Image (cartoon, grey):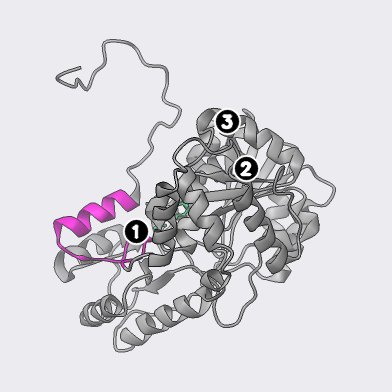
Amino acid sequence: MGNAKTTPLITLPPSKLPNLPESIFSTMNQVALQNNALNLAQGFPDFPADPRLIAYLNEAMKAGYNQYAPMAGIYSLREAIAEKIQNLYKASYNPEKEITLTVGATQAIYTAITAMVHPGDEVIVFKPAYDCYEPTVKAAGGTVVPLQMEGKHFKINWEAFRKALGPKTRMVVINSPHNPSGTVLTDEDMEELENSLAGTDVMVLSDEAYEHLVFDGQPLRSVARYPALAERSFLCASFGKTFHATGWKMGYCAAPAALMKEFLKIHEFAVFAVHHPTQRALSKYLKEPEHYLNLPGFFQQKRDTFLQSIQGSRFRYTPAQGTYFQILEYDTITDEPDVEFAKRLAAEFGIAGIPISVFNLNQQDNRQLRFCFAKKDETLQQAGEILSRV
Ligand code: PMP
Ligand code: GLN
């Protein structure tokens, strides 16, 4: 309508998300761009996706798979996902009734929360938390119950968790491997979760965007591996992260049939069906398991290259156990707040990272920045040189 006015002529209803700050990913991307800084802020690879996967996508388009896919996704891809889960976690999900393709993990998470959370329900979220859970809970009329993870290793306080559980608790969100901390939940953590939820109707939303990115010989620990948890869980995953194609925004949700039935009622009217040719390409690519089985080694080497490159710097760290993010502590360098320090690093030194305080309870600032190491080795070397000058 021509000149956009900031004050509309009509009276708007109250905002569902008042006071929502600008995404830190947009802020830091902009800061990186303005300063022509090396961008290790937002989590995406600076190397290409496998040409083989791209060829499969081209083939699918040329073969004419350009019309709507079935609502939950093409059967062959749902079957390939079910097989992957079966092989890795010895858990069986019915491809027809228990797996749905989504627009990235984000839409899987949005849809699971929207399908299950009613006004007045409480959802427990561990902080620091990836930024999409809380606004979605609030938009659904729910209340977020944030619990800060503790200490340098971001451990969940299970005693505090049990105290936070109550008659209004509908769901708990877990995310392992964890963004932004790079930690992973242990078998003991999963046991604590299982025992705490036994006898309740509390559901689990398991954000497994970094499912395949665990290091130092640790096993993958999807919620699917724990039957008593899996039966109450929405497992949300991201092909963007797994196959170096974050721009494809392709993911999936796996959940027991009764949960998936409700999930699909929301999915149908938000999305109906996701990009068909990409599904064809992925169903072929998933039949070659080496593409995901090699990921831990591939990213562990990237982590180690990055850590090696900052040996001479004043930053301190505990090596990431998973994800493609490394937290660096800078309290030995300055006591500037992390958001300011992140902006100054971009402006003065030419490197961008993400300040952790924005994900913490009450923006608690532990003088930590997150750097993405899903980058070419040259980029990581360059990052190391810059960080060593700080
Ligand atoms: N969860 C976490 C923890 C993430 O870091 C991301 C960002 N990729 C997502 C979910 C969203 O994934 P997608 O890009 O597949 O929507
Ligand atoms: N998941 C990515 C990260 O944590 C970015 C997602 C986003 O830009 N919203 O950096």
Residue, disc 2: 123
For the magenta stretch, what is the residue range? 25-46
User: What is the spatial separation of the Cα atoms under label 2 and label 1, in whole angstroms?
Assistant: 26 Å
Depth check, mark 3 against mark 1: the one in front is 3
Residue, disc 1: 42
Mark 1 is on which residue type? Gln
Residue 253, image x, y percentages: 61, 48
Q: Secondary structure at mark 1?
A: loop
Pick the front one: 248 or 321: 248
Residue 248, image x, y percentages: 41, 51
Q: Residue at x 46, y 50 (%)?
A: 278
Q: Residue at x 56, y 82 (%)?
A: 216
Residue 366, image x, y percentages: 41, 65
- Looking at the rendered image, the quarter that the C terminus falls into is bottom left
Furthest toward the right, the residue is: 199
Q: Residues within 10 Å of mark 1 (few under 14, many from 20)?
A: some
Residue, disc 3: 268
